[in-house]
């Protein structure tokens, strides 16, 4: 080497040291890039999970209700329709007044009433309708608290900030503490979040409506994109002549896969809503739009799955006199199915998380009812997230995060299924 | 013994796109005889084989001119159904290619798609006979439900032969059936061909001149897309008339 | 009508299949007959002939039904109403249809309308019955005719397979129809917009306020449509996003493909992919709720005035979302660089980083550029993050701390909520959509060409 003299050797060594330093720096950049990406992921998921946890529970307070027969069922018919029309919110107010008889001021009374959710009256009605024999007696029932009271009890509203900056007044805090001290308050897992539709009140809102809407939407998407995508892939791989027309289809499919999703929404609005007059806000239209959006994904995945089936299998089948269609139906398709399924699930997962095109076709309406079919107006999970994220009350943050967590759970389940399918059934030739 | 002509090729020219693969091929394949096609790589022997059962139809650029007849009927005729043609002309490929299904289903496949069996018992019978004739039955009798891909290479190839004869073809085309097999498995297949020839016309493409000499009654030598010479195997190997045949046989090229 | 007709047709088709099959079995038992095709194909043959023409008739029937009913009801209207202007007659008919189906909203209907509605209901019933019968009759005719065609020599299999192949080919054309649909709907609506607002104003004017008019001479008091600030905002946010995604994504790809142990690779790669799988609405929520206020707080602590819906917050999160696109595409590209090139450089005594910088990256550059373009088109078309975290006000600025708006935000804003169709506002959304489509298309095409050329180079 350069052992001409000590001087040159030292220079060479210094140079080498510099080069190694550069090497280490470069490596560090790479590692930190990965770290940045993964930390963002952890930060994003972590903050969502932390914010979601309060959204899954809620505080209930046990109150005594005087089920006065003269008010609930003056005629004494015990007719459910008759009872259902009674003024249950009045009963809740009466119960609260009895609870704190010293509260006389109208403003204070209103503050007191604001501790309990408007849903308390519905729960009371449901309890009475379920068991009309209760009428005339006193009923002790746990009813949901309002979102603000709940947040204070969860510690999400800080008691130490000045009263004016807080959504719960000192007086309300005192009442709540009184209830807590009496052991009347309980924090429960909030099943209503999973079983009810949307609502203006965070404590009454649930994702069931959005989940049903998502189900119908994805069902339509699957029923359209799977058969169409697989047929197209089979045609292009197995039957299509290699010519300009098929090249054009191929280029077209690749480009379609990269068209921004919102453009599919514009297509849906212009063609399906305005031209064909299909209903707004319906899973049917949402499903069709998402199907067109996922179609390229399904086609591309199916094509590569079909391509992976070795030609020797096709030759073997042709050699014993199978027709090309029989070759596909008996051999190529069954062998390619795991790959096709994997691609389809991934496409469906994309469709499940998609929001933008659905906004275009009016799936942003406030819908309380659970949709009964693909033509009923409905929301889907990501749109529900979008709508709740826009709401000003603090409690919505937790509901939104909880809904996101549910959405992510579905997505992870779908992707895991895809991975498992691939690992379990993928055949190496 | 009088041998009937099963297949005739007349003035066969085959193109792949611009490139011509076969030139004016004239060849007869006889019943109850093994015909060997020999020649250096790329000489067109596999192309010729694939013309007989129209496997070349799959290749879009392939163009076939001339005439091939099976029992006097033009196989490229307008009213020929390729699928039925291939049921009459079975094929065994270079690399064993069993379906990734059970041994039973492999053999039963052809019989099923052509509806050869009226009921399950009949299908069982077809499968058993075919395995028996392919000399595989004894080895797989107790594991018919196992996947065909789990067999050894030689067994797989005999499975493919069983699969081919299960459709009761009249001709069996073999495209270098032993090139992926060891000598013992090769010997078994060759033995098998000797038995099968009692019922079928067999055409075999082979790179091994010893194999051609061992198994076939007639041999055709292909070179650069032409049939240079054809005739009784014994004569071709002992007294070839063409220079190129002699060079090839004596190992001077190929 | 659709449901019932489909159900009946399904039953008829199943019957057709069964009849075809049975007849072919009888034929097979006939004297000296050998079937060309198996009985199942004969069944399918008859079923196809039964269902195919019937479905065509069904589609026509679905299209024609409301028109026939409308014409019939119109014919039966009293002279007084028929004499009205065409538009009013149509409104009257639409109201009658709504009343008949129970979806009528409005003042107490007049007697004439009630009469028309009951006419409508009656005639609709009759029309439906006739149309469904027609569908079934065509199906039955197809069945009878094709059943008569059956013979041992019939190539039912070939016919059925041709039909199936036709269906397969038709499915692959759907992708083209979608593209045509997109282009036509965008171009058609945008053309109507440009009839109201000059294209030069849209492309070059710097005032965008579609909701309110700022000059009296503007169309229908519907505002100004100079889209330059919208384009500029899109570019600003995209630039912020790319400045995160490109270095992080590229270095991740380099580390994963050149340095990482197989263990790190197997774990880090799928974890990165998760970033790509998270719905954009989740990113939007995160950007608006956590990152936006965080940046604002950080800015305030150093004395900077940061908008709470700053371009920086939206761009940052969009950048994170795009990291996996850049990294996985670059990873593929870097892996495609032949090992021999690396070995040549390493063999000369170069360090790994020198090899990467002077050999691998230059070789992979066209592919990486393609990947970056694809990621960019993704960023430009991204909607939810900007809708939730970027602003609404169109401001012409290059300061990422200010709030800007983007093309996708404006499309969403113009088309959500109640608005009349055909107004300049809603049509403007389609004009923006057209620009968005064209720009992303061009980026994609260039990127694809670049990546393909690059791949071919090393194949």
Image (spheres, helix red, strand yellow):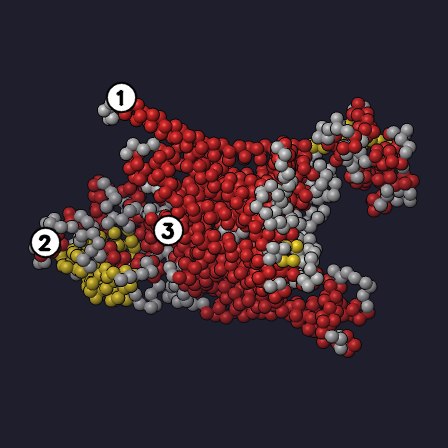
Task: Please give the count of numbered marks on the rendered protein.
Answer: 3
The chain identifier of the residue carrying mark 1 reads: A
Residue at (69, 53) in percent of width and height = C417
The chain identifier of the residue carrying mark 2 reads: B
Q: Nearer the viewer, mark 1 or mark 2?
A: 1
Q: Secondary structure at mark 3?
A: helix
The residue that label 1 is drawn on is: A6
Residue at (27, 57) in percent of width and height = B50
- Gap in angstroms between the C-alphas marked 1 and 2: 74 Å
Whether label 1 touches label 2, CB < 8 Å: no
Instruction: Tell me the crowding category of disc 1: few under 14, some 14 to 19, or many 20 or more residues within 10 angstroms, Cα based.
Output: few
Give the quarter of the image for residue C154: bottom left
Using residue C70 as the reference point, say whether residue C363 is left or right of it: left
Out of C52 and A270, give the one closest to the viewer.
Answer: A270
Q: Residue furthest top?
A: A6
Q: Residue furthest front?
A: A7
| Labels 3 and 1 share a subunit | no
- Gap in angstroms between the C-alphas marked 3 and 2: 49 Å
Residue at (81, 65) in percent of width and height = C109
The chain identifier of the residue carrying mark 3 reads: C
The residue that label 3 is drawn on is: C453
Q: Quadrant of the C terminus of chain A?
A: top left
x then y, percent, for residue C184:
55, 63
Q: Secondary structure at mark 2?
A: helix
Using residue A306 as the reference point, say whether residue A132 is left or right of it: right
Using residue A212 as the reference point, say whether residue C154 is left or right of it: left
Residue B246 disc label: 2
């Amino acid at each position: 080497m350069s052992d001409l003299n000590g001087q040159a050797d030292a220079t060479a060594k210094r140079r080498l040291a510099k080069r190694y330093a550069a090497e280490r720096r470069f490596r560090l950049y790479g590692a930190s890039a990965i770290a940045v990406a993964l930390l963002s992921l952890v930060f994003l998921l972590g903050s969502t999970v932390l914010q979601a946890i309060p959204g899954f529970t809620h505080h209930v307070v046990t109150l005594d209700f005087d089920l006065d027969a003269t008010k609930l069922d003056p005629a004494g018919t015990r007719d459910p329709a008759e009872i259902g029309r009674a003024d249950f919110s009045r009963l809740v107010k009466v119960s609260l007044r009895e609870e704190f008889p010293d509260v006389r001021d109208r403003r204070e009374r209103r503050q007191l009433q604001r501790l309990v959710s408007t849903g308390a009256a519905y729960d009371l009605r449901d309890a009475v309708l379920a068991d009309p024999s209760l009428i005339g007696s006193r009923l002790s029932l746990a009813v949901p608290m309002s979102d603000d009271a709940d947040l204070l009890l969860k510690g999400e509203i800080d008691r130490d900030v000045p009263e004016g900056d807080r959504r719960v007044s000192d007086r309300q805090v005192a009442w709540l503490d009184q209830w807590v001290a009496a052991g009347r308050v309980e924090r429960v897992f909030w099943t209503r979040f999973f079983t009810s539709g949307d609502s203006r009140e965070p404590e009454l809102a649930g994702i069931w409506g959005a989940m049903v809407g998502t189900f119908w939407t994805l069902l339509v998407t699957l029923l359209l994109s799977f058969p169409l995508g697989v047929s197209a892939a089979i045609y292009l791989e197995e039957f299509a002549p290699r010519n300009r027309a098929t090249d054009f289809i191929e280029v077209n499919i690749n480009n379609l896969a990269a068209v921004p999703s919102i453009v599919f929404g514009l297509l849906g609005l212009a063609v399906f809503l305005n031209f064909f007059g299909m209903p707004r806000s319906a899973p049917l239209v949402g499903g069709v739009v998402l199907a067109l959006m996922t179609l390229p994904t399904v086609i591309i995945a199916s094509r590569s799955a079909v391509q992976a089936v070795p030609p020797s299998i096709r030759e073997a089948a042709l050699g014993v006199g199978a027709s090309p269609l029989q070759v596909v139906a008996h051999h190529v398709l069954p062998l390619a199915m795991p790959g096709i399924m994997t691609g389809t699930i991934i496409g469906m997962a994309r469709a499940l998380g998609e929001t933008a095109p659905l906004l275009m076709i009016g799936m942003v309406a406030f819908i309380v009812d659970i949709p009964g079919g693909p033509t009923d107006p409905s929301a889907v999970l990501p749109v529900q997230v979008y709508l709740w994220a826009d709401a000003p009350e603090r409690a919505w943050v937790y509901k939104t995060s909880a809904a996101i967590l549910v959405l992510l759970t579905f997505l992870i389940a779908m992707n895991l299924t895809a991975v498992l399918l691939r690992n379990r059934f993928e055949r190496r030739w | 013994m009088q041998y009937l002509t099963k297949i005739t090729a007349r003035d066969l020219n085959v193109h792949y796109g611009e490139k011509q693969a076969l030139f004016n091929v004239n060849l007869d394949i006889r019943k109850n005889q093994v015909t060997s096609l020999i020649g250096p790589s790329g000489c067109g022997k596999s192309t010729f084989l694939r013309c007989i059962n129209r496997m070349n139809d799959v290749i879009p650029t392939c163009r076939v001119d001339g005439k091939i007849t099976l029992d006097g009927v033009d196989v490229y005729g307008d009213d020929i159904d390729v699928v039925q043609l291939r049921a009459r002309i079975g094929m065994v490929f270079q690399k064993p290619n069993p379906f990734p299904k059970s041994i039973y289903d492999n053999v039963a496949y052809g019989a099923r798609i052509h509806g050869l069996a009226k009921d399950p018992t009949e299908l069982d019978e077809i499968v058993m006979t075919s395995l028996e004739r392919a000399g595989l039955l004894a080895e797989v009798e107790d594991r018919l439900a196992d996947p065909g891909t789990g067999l050894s290479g030689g067994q797989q190839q005999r499975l493919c032969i069983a699969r081919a004869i299960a459709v009761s073809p009249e001709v069996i085309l073999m495209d270098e059936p032993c090139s992926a097999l060891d000598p013992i498995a090769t010997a078994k297949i060759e033995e098998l061909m000797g038995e099968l020839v009692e019922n079928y016309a067999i055409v075999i493409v082979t790179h091994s001149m010893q194999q051609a000499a061992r198994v076939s009654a007639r041999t055709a030598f292909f070179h650069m897309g032409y049939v240079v010479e054809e005739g009784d195997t014994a004569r071709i190997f002992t007294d070839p008339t063409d220079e190129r045949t002699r060079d090839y046989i004596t190992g001077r090229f190929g | 009508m659709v449901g019932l007709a489909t159900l009946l047709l399904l039953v008829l088709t199943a019957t057709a299949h069964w009849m075809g099959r049975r007849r072919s079995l009888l034929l097979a038992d006939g004297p000296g007959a050998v079937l060309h095709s198996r009985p199942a194909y004969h069944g399918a043959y008859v079923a196809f002939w039964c269902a195919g023409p019937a479905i065509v008739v069904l589609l026509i029937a679905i299209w024609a039904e409301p028109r026939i009913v409308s014409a019939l009801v119109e014919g039966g209207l009293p002279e007084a109403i028929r004499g009205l202007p065409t538009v009013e007659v149509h409104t009257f008919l639409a109201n009658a249809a709504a009343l008949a189906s129970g979806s009528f909203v409005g003042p107490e209907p007049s007697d004439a309308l009630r009469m028309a509605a009951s006419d409508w209901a009656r005639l609709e019933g009759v029309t439906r019955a006739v149309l469904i019968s027609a569908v079934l009759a065509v199906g039955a005719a197809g069945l009878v005719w094709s059943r008569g065609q059956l013979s041992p020599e019939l190539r039912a299999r070939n016919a059925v397979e041709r039909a199936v192949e036709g269906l397969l080919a038709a499915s692959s054309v759907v992708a083209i129809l979608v593209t045509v649909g997109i282009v036509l709907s965008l171009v058609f609506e945008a053309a109507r917009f440009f009839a109201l607002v000059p294209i030069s104003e849209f492309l070059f004017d710097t005032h965008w306020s579609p909701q309110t008019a700022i000059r009296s001479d503007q169309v229908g008091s519907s505002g100004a449509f100079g889209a330059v600030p919208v384009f500029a905002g899109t570019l600003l946010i995209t630039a912020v996003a790319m400045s995160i995604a490109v270095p992080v994504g590229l270095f991740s790809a380099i580390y994963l493909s050149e340095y990482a142990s197989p263990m790190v690779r197997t774990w880090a790669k799928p974890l990165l992919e998760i970033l790509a799988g998270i719905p954009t609405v989740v990113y939007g929520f995160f950007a608006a709720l956590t990152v936006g206020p965080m940046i604002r707080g950080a800015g305030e602590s150093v004395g900077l005035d940061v908008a709470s819906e700053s371009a920086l917050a939206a761009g940052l999160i969009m950048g994170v979302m795009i990291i996996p696109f850049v990294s996985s595409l670059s990873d593929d590209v870097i892996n495609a660089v032949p090992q021999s090139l690396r070995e040549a450089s390493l063999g000369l005594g170069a360090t790994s980083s020198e090899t990467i910088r002077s050999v691998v990256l230059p070789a992979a550059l066209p592919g990486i550029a393609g990947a970056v373009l694809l990621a960019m088109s993704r960023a430009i078309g991204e909607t939810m993050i900007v809708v939730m975290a970027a602003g609404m006000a169109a401001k012409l600025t290059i300061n990422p701390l200010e709030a800007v708006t983007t093309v996708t935000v404006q499309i969403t804003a113009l088309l959500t909520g109640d608005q009349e169709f055909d107004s300049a506002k809603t049509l403007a959304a389609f004009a923006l959509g057209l620009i968005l489509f064209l720009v992303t298309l061009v980026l994609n095409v260039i990127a694809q060409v670049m990546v393909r050329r690059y791949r071919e180079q090393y194949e």
